[in-house]
Image (tube, helix red, strand yellow):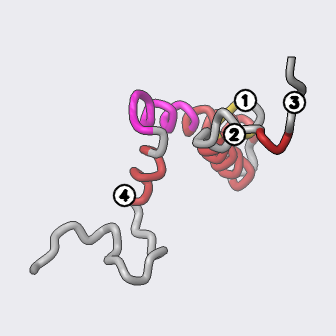
Amino acid sequence: MESFNPHEYVPRRLDAPAKFLLWDFDLVASGIAGLAFGIIVNSLLMGAIASYAAIWAYSHLKQKRHPGYGLHYLYWQFPFRTFKRTPPSSRRFFVG
């Protein structure tokens, strides 16, 4: 039996999404947003409810779709200005 050679190791999951413990990072981020809402209104119960609702809504939004669907949805629904050469995401129709 051959021994393990770290120079020939090939990882199995190159395209795996970023995770925080057991959960996907985007679900954790939506839960943290709910907890931040609870901190703003100074209520732990409201934060827990908002966190649960945000995680539930986001998980149902991306269920049975592409793994990056949630981020794509956020890009098209909110007016981000991250790219300088492309038009904003809120501009849907082009004359041309």
The residue closer to the viewer here, 77 or 23, is 23
Instruction: Assign a secondary structure to mark 3.
Output: loop
Q: Which of 43 and 54 lies nearest the eye of the viewer?
A: 54
Say which element carries label 1.
Answer: loop
- Lower sequence index among marks 4 and 2: 2
**Cα separation between marks 1 and 4:** 28 Å
Rendered location of residue 50, percent (x, y): 61, 39
Relative to 37, is 2 on the left or the right?
right
Which residue has dot 3 on it?
4
Residue at 48% of width from left, 74% of height from top? Answer: 82
User: The residue under label 1 is which amino acid type?
Assistant: Leu
- Counting residues from the start of the chain, the first of labels 3 and 4 encountered is 3
Q: Do the residues labelled 2 and 1 touch (CB within 8 Å)?
A: yes
Q: Is residue 18 left or right of residue 95?
A: right
Rendered position, 23 above or below 39: above
Q: Which amino acid does label 2 sit on?
A: Lys
Seen at 66% across and 44% down, the residue is: 18
**Magenta span of residues:** 55-66
Residue 31 visible, this orientation: no
Q: Where is residue 55 in the image (x, y as percent from the top left)?
A: 58, 35
Q: Which mark is nearer the camera, 3 or 2?
A: 3
Q: Which amino acid does label 3 sit on?
A: Phe
Can the viewer see residue 24?
yes
Instruction: Decide whether residue 59 is among the magenta residues.
Output: yes
Q: Which of 5 and 71 is in front in this view?
A: 5
* The label number, if any, that marks residue 77 in the structure image: 4
Which quadrant, please, contains the C terminus?
A: bottom left
Query: Is residue 75 highlighted in magenta?
Result: no
* Residue at the spot 71% in from the left edge and 35% down from the top edge: 45
